Image (tube, rainbow, N blue to C red):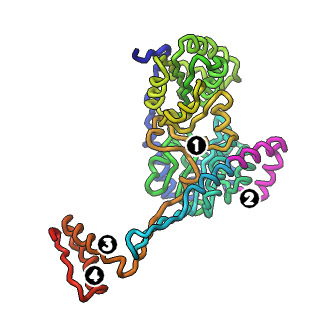
């Protein structure tokens, strides 16, 4: 049977795509032309903050003293998990070389970018975990300079726990500046910072648009939209856990889609019955976000079997994908499009968001079809090199000359000719395109 929508979204992420491009472009242009002073003007206007922009060691120490020991222990625990996972990821990239033909060696070299700019959201929610996810991976990659940037609260400054986490994880500088102006400061190298080679980290639509505009002159992790989550559940799933997980992700924002895909109508109906009560039990701002997300963006989809469920999930290509169903190895092998996968009821998206070790900066808006999330690899450049003996270059040069001439690229061909004539002056070669 065709899939059936027991609940259908009335809005999508594109429905809310307000035109922020012109606003962001104007801010970037103004800051690039006006430098530090222009960035400070925007900080005063948008952040409502007049305090220190680059935090001193003393200010970092003072902020750290405001963080409870229990929270410090939790941050250290999460940092250690993220660091160790990043180190394992890094070990999968190695310098290699191969003798292509006798005497001709080609190789791969892995080089970290020099300067990373890590954006840590601090508006609606203070994303301590984002500091851990972004700064730690940059540090493990080997970036020479890491800037952590987060918006200050009006008249107060950055969240002390974000400052503490950024410093613990290895940030060289901590920039108390939010939004487009913070992204611009890292990109353009303001306030004495080195120009960032890559910008990473989540942010609101203005931060996302700034990264989109700047991509090319600086690298980015990905272009992100509202966070989204999908749960695959069969008749064996616990309806309360499924409903709780959906609500937990819906609180991200009013436009954060959550989807349930199942082959069991009874489960679906029970989850739909539970969700409103769980949302109403949240604190006010969380309740407001989750209410709108569930009302306007959530979907509950009934499929005929697990293959149809998996195919539906791959089509949605969710940022977060949870499986609460039998035969987890089958799902792990079958599913292909997701940012991060959570197998079984013993784990949940929040574990990955905060402390389990995998990264929470993930592809949204179906971009999981072609990319994964932030990892140590995002900061690494895989470059190639080659070196040859004269004998090793002979066969390569002959093939190069003929292919280049067939393409009409005579200048290329002559660079190969010149080496053949120099290295093998007593030999004759047929280097014509039809030779």
Range drawn in magenta: 54-81
Query: Percent from the top left, x then y, of residue 115?
Result: 58, 61
Give the residue pinned by disc 3: 396
Q: Residues at badges 2 and 3 in contact (C-beta under 8 Å)?
A: no
Give the residue pinned by disc 1: 361
Nearest the camera: 305 or 41? Answer: 305
Looking at this view, name the residue that lies furthest to the bottom. 426
- The answer to which of marks 2 and 3 sits earlier in the sequence is 2
Nearest to viewer (mark 1 / mark 2) = 1
Q: Which mark is residue 420?
A: 4
- Tell me how far mark 2 sits from mark 3, CA to CA: 56 Å
In the rendered view, would you say 217 is above or below 285?
A: below
Is disc 2 placed on a helix, strand or loop?
A: loop
Question: Callout 3: few (<14), some (14-19), or many (20+) C-alpha neighbours within 10 Å?
Answer: some
Is disc 3 placed on a helix, strand or loop?
A: helix
Give the residue pinned by disc 2: 56
- The answer to which of marks 3 and 1 sits earlier in the sequence is 1
Q: Residue 287 carries which label?
A: none
On the rendered image, what quadrant is the C terminus found in? bottom left
- Tell me how far mark 1 sits from mark 4, CA to CA: 51 Å
Q: Residues at badges 1 and 2 in contact (C-beta under 8 Å)?
A: no
Query: Percent from the top left, x then y, of residue 164?
Result: 75, 49
- Tell me how far mark 1 sits from mark 2, CA to CA: 28 Å
Query: Percent from the top left, x then y, of residue 285?
Result: 66, 26
Question: Callout 2: few (<14), some (14-19), or many (20+) C-alpha neighbours within 10 Å?
Answer: few
């Amino acid at each position: 049977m065709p899939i059936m929508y027991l609940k259908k979204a009335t809005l999508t992420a594109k429905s809310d795509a307000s035109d922020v491009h012109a606003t962001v472009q104007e801010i970037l242009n103004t800051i690039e032309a006006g430098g530090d002073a222009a960035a400070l003007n925007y900080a005063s206007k948008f952040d409502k903050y007049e305090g220190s922009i680059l935090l001193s060691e003393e200010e970092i120490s003072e902020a750290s003293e405001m963080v409870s020991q229990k929270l410090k222990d939790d941050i250290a625990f999460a940092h250690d998990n993220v660091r160790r996972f990043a180190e394992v990821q890094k070990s999968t990239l190695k310098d290699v070389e191969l003798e292509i033909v006798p005497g001709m060696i080609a190789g791969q070299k892995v080089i970290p970018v020099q300067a990373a700019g890590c954006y840590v959201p601090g508006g609606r929610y203070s994303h301590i975990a984002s500091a851990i996810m972004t700064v730690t991976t940059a540090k493990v990659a080997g970036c020479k300079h890491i800037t952590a940037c987060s918006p200050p609260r009006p008249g107060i400054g950055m969240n002390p726990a974000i400052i503490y986490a950024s410093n613990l994880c290895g940030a060289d500088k901590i920039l108390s500046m939010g939004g487009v102006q913070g992204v611009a400061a890292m990109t353009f190298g303001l306030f004495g910072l080195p120009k960032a080679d890559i910008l990473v980290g989540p942010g609101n639509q203005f931060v996302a648009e700034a990264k989109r505009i700047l991509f090319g002159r600086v690298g980015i992790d990905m272009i992100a939209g509202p966070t989204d989550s999908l749960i695959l559940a069969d008749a064996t799933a616990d309806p309360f856990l499924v409903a709780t997980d959906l609500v937990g992700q819906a609180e991200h924002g009013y436009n954060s889609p959550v989807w349930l895909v199942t082959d069991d109508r009874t489960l679906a109906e029970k989850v739909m019955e539970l969700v409103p009560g769980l949302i109403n039990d949240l604190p006010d701002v969380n309740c407001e976000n989750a209410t709108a997300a569930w009302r306007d963006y959530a979907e509950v989809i009934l499929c005929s079997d697990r293959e149809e469920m998996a195919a539906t999930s791959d089509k949605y290509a969710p940022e977060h994908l949870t499986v609460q169903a039998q035969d987890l190895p089958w799902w792990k092998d079958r599913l292909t499009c997701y940012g991060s996968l959570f197998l079984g009821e013993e784990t949940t998206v929040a574990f990955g968001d905060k402390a389990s070790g995998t990264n929470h900066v993930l592809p949204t808006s179906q971009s999981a079809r072609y990319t994964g999330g932030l990892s140590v690899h995002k900061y690494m450049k895989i470059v190639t090199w080659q070196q040859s003996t004269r004998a090793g270059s002979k066969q390569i040069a002959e093939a190069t000359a003929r292919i280049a001439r067939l393409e009409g690229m005579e200048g290329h061909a002559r660079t190969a000719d010149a080496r053949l004539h120099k290295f093998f002056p007593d030999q004759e070669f047929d280097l014509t395109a039809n030779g």
